Image: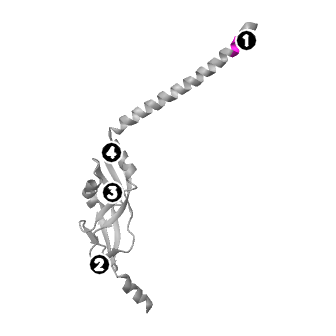
Amino acid sequence: MKGNTETRPELTKKGVGNTNRDIVVFAFFLFLSFALWYLNALGKDAEAGIKYPVVFTNLPKDRIITEKPQMWLTIYLKGKGSSILKLKFTGKKIPVNIDISKVNYRRVPGSQNLDYYIVSSGLIKSLTVQLRSGCEVTSIKPDTIFFTLEKNVPSTVKSGKNAR
């Protein structure tokens, strides 16, 4: 009995070492299987919504946007998972351009100001070209973008009016 008790602590120490090593090996293969599953999922078709900042370009001559319109669009895409992942990383940095000279914007009925709106579904084709990702734009939210165009008054005239 005395001999058994002396060897038992050594066996227990080895058993603890083996258990820790088994946990490390299990965790490694669990991580490896997750990584392979994720790479496989990136190759399949997926759908996602990505928020993009908006920039308005080519405003009519002598006009400015006075009231800030919706400055973010959520663009819903369908395509390969890898393409969508790439767009998710660049989406917050690169704004989408809405070329006012090329879109069909309409005046808000009954408004006193120069309030206009754009129906977002009319932007799908131009946004698909801008993104150049191989993904298809399925929809855009909000469905309507409102903005106000006012005459651009030069700053010298503005300061002259305030001086009187």
Label 4 CA crowd tier, 10 Å (few <14, some 14–19, many 20+) = some
Question: Marks 1 and 2, how far apart in space?
Answer: 95 Å
What SS does tag 2 mark?
loop
Instruction: Please name the amino acid that badge 2 sits on.
Output: Asp
Q: Along the horizontal axis of the image, is 83 left or right of 102?
A: right
Give the mark, 2 or 3, whose residue is nearer the N terminus. 2
Q: Residue at x 36, y 62 (%)?
A: 54
Q: Main secondary structure of the magenta part?
A: helix
Front disc: 4 or 1: 1
What residue does disc 2 label? 62
Q: Pointer 3: what residue?
A: 140
Which residues, given as a range, are shown in magenta?
A: 5-9
The disc label shown at residue 6, or none: 1
Residue sitting at x 33%, y 79%: 152
Q: Disc 4 marks which residue?
A: 83
Distance (Cα) linking label 2 and label 3? 29 Å
Rendered image: mark on residue 112: none
Determine the CA span between mark 2 and mark 4. Answer: 40 Å
